[in-house]
Image (tube, rainbow, N blue to C red):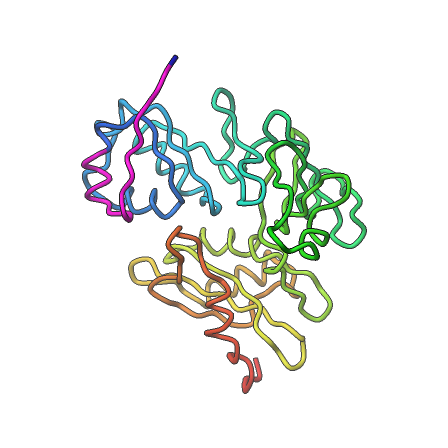
Amino acid sequence: SAGGAMMFLPKFDVEKVIAVMRDCTTMMGVPTFYTRLLDHRKFDASLTKHMRLFISGSAPMLSETHVLFEERTGHKVLERYGMTETNMSTSNPFVGERRAGSVGFPLPGVALKIVDPDTGEPVQKGDIGVIEVRGPNVFNGYWNMPEKTAEELRSDGFFITGDLARMDEDGYVTIVGRGKDLIISGGFNIYPKELEMILDDQVGVLESAVIAVPHADMGEATLAILVRRESGPDINQIKALMKRDVARFKHPRDYIVVDELPRNTMGKVQKNVMRETYGSWFSSSTI
């Protein structure tokens, strides 16, 4: 038999986490926890040399964070995917290749498919669709909400997660966003994650969020919100990059530079808050 103790903190405090880490062997957190640790001068390989595993979930971790964390500590963060209705559904392997930006493979006993949201039919490998999962991890339904249960839980047991993803030829699953975050501008589908990955790599950008904002002509328009790193980004340079490398219909109509993105207590970026905050951004604009 084996056992272990769990250490709960009332909130994430980087100083307290560093203080108790010497007494722990595993850490579970959201990406924000890891970026804040990397920003602290005391967080290094000597502090983490006894650790067995670092796990990240609840929100996608930037590939840059994966790389910086491994360079600093020698550990590869294990990223996985789950939700309240399904518990854990996928994970990168404990032993094997952990791919930055991917949430790995379906867990044993879990059936996962990526389907066309309109037809429910599986999409081709590499194409984007909605994740559906079935297995002993999936709940039986919403309490006293039969209509919502019928909408999201199919008769064959597959739960419609609402998360958009693709699966590569090796079976690794990559989350690209929530279905409700999909932007439809002028009849074209725009996946925010695709643009965010480009924006996050630009000089002067710490992280980004791409959202849909009402637009009189296009129905919805793309607004890019950038968190400044140091002196901040060169917007003209970013526009030139977009013009060169990205299809025109995907280009953000405008860019906003901020100090930070709104997050909930779990560290998840709250795009609903940003959509409300910037909902009238294009109402009197000719952009």
Locate residue 267, reporting x and y percent. 39, 52
Residue drawn at (21%, 28%) of the image:
22
Most prominent secondary structure in the magenta stretch?
A: loop
Residue drawn at (58%, 35%) of the image:
89
The image quadrant where one finds the C terminus is bottom right
Please tell me whether residue 195 is drawn above or below residue 37 in the rendered image. below
Residue extending furthest toward the bottom: 284
Judge from the rendering whether residue 108 lies leftward or rightward of residue 61; answer left or right: right
The image quadrant where one finds the N terminus is top left
Please tell me whether residue 106 is drawn above or below residue 258 in the rendered image. above
Locate residue 51, reporting x and y percent. 30, 25
In front of the other: 163 or 7? 7
Locate residue 25, reporting x and y percent. 30, 25
Residue extending furthest toward the top: 1
Locate residue 262, reporting x and y percent. 39, 62
Residue 268 within the segment the image draws in magenta: no
In front of the other: 53 or 108? 108
In front of the other: 265 or 4? 4
Give the extent of the magenta segment. 2-20
Residue 16 within the segment the image draws in magenta: yes
Please tell me whether residue 247 is drawn above or below residue 124 in the rendered image. below
Q: How many marks?
A: 0
Judge from the rendering whether residue 100 lies leftward or rightward of residue 148; answer left or right: left
Residue drawn at (28%, 49%) of the image:
11
